[in-house]
Amino acid sequence: MNPVEEKPHGFLVRHPWLFVVFAFGLLITAWTALITVAVKHSPQQVELNLK
């Protein structure tokens, strides 16, 4: 008998690339939220009369 029994690995351990996909999805979501808030709360445009 083998004293060290290997337990079956979890789904995420067998597919570590899913962490990368999740991280990029989180990054894109955060940037989208940041840009959306920035556009909604952009400062008022002031006209400049340069002569």
Image (cartoon, rainbow, N blue to C red):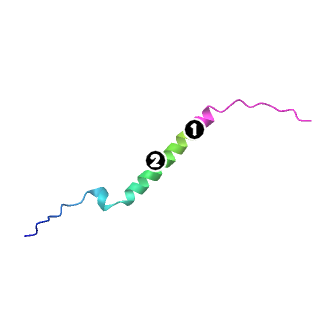
Membership of 40 in magenta stretch: yes
Q: Residue 41: image x %, image y %? A: 62, 31
Q: Amino acid at mark 1?
A: Thr
Q: Is residue 13 above or below residue 31?
A: below
Q: CA distance from mark 1 to mark 2?
A: 15 Å
Range of magenta residues: 36-51
Judging from the image, what secondary structure is the residue with disc 1 in?
Answer: helix
Q: Residue furthest left?
A: 1
Image quadrant of residue 6? bottom left
Q: Which residue is mark 2?
A: 26
Side of 29 where 1 appears, left or right:
left
Name the residue: 47% across, 52% down.
Answer: 24
Q: Residue 30: image x %, image y %? A: 50, 43
Q: Residue 49: image x %, image y %? A: 87, 32
**Magenta stretch, main secondary structure class:** loop
Q: Quadrant of the N terminus?
A: bottom left
Q: Is residue 13 above or below residue 36?
A: below
Q: Are marks 1 and 2 in contact (CB under 8 Å)?
A: no
